[in-house]
Amino acid sequence: MVLPVKVWIDNDTHLAHTIDIAPTGARLGVLRQQLQIGMSVTLQRGTKKAKFRITWVRQLTPREAQAGVEALESQNKFWGISLSDREQEDKKDAQAFLMLLSNS
């Protein structure tokens, strides 16, 4: 799910967006600054801020990267959506797909 976020690295703010989200972390895209695994960053989504740790970095071009981030503290609705509803929808879609395959 693509959601806009602000990424605070040291005292600098950068704009980015999520590519995937989970209750404990996310994959971020459109990152244009140097990142290192283990680095702590703060994400801001709306008025909520939370600390995360960079768990992996994938350099797409010399000036753009994606990164996996893991929450350093428990997040309650940080993303502003209910992930449990989305997980239920994904399970239903997977079950429907398997039923379709078994009937073929």
Image (cartoon, rainbow, N blue to C red):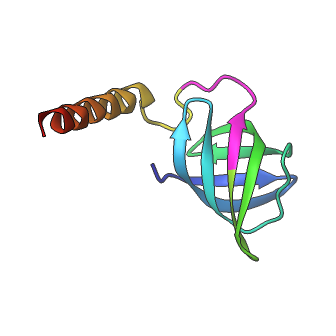
Q: Quadrant of residue 83?
A: top left
Tell me: residue 84, above or below residue 96. above
In the image, taking residue 73 as reference, residue 46 lies left or right, namely left
Q: Residue 20, image x and y in percent?
A: 52, 47
Q: Nearer the viewer, residue 18 or 91?
A: 91
In the image, taking residue 69 as reference, residue 76 lies left or right, namely left
Tally the numbered discs: 0
Tell me: residue 36, above or below residue 22. below
Q: Residue, x 45% and y 48% (percent of image)? A: 1
Tell me: residue 29, above or below residue 80. below
In the image, taking residue 38 as reference, residue 83 lies left or right, namely left
Q: Is residue 13 one of those drawn in magenta?
A: no
Q: Residue, x 56% and y 34% (percent of image)? A: 78
In the image, taking residue 91 as reference, residue 3 lies left or right, namely right
Q: Residue 43, image x and y in percent?
A: 68, 45
Q: Residue, x 82% and y 57% (percent of image)? A: 35
Q: Residue 68, image x and y in percent?
A: 68, 47
- Which residues are the magenta region? 68-76
Q: Quadrant of residue 38?
A: top right
Q: Quadrant of residue 76?
A: top right
Q: Quadrant of the C terminus?
A: top left
Q: Is residue 72 one of those drawn in magenta?
A: yes
Q: Residue 7, image x and y in percent?
A: 71, 53
Residue located farthest toward the bottom when viewing the structure as drawn: 62
Q: Nearer the viewer, residue 78 or 69?
A: 69
Q: Nearer the viewer, residue 10 or 19?
A: 19
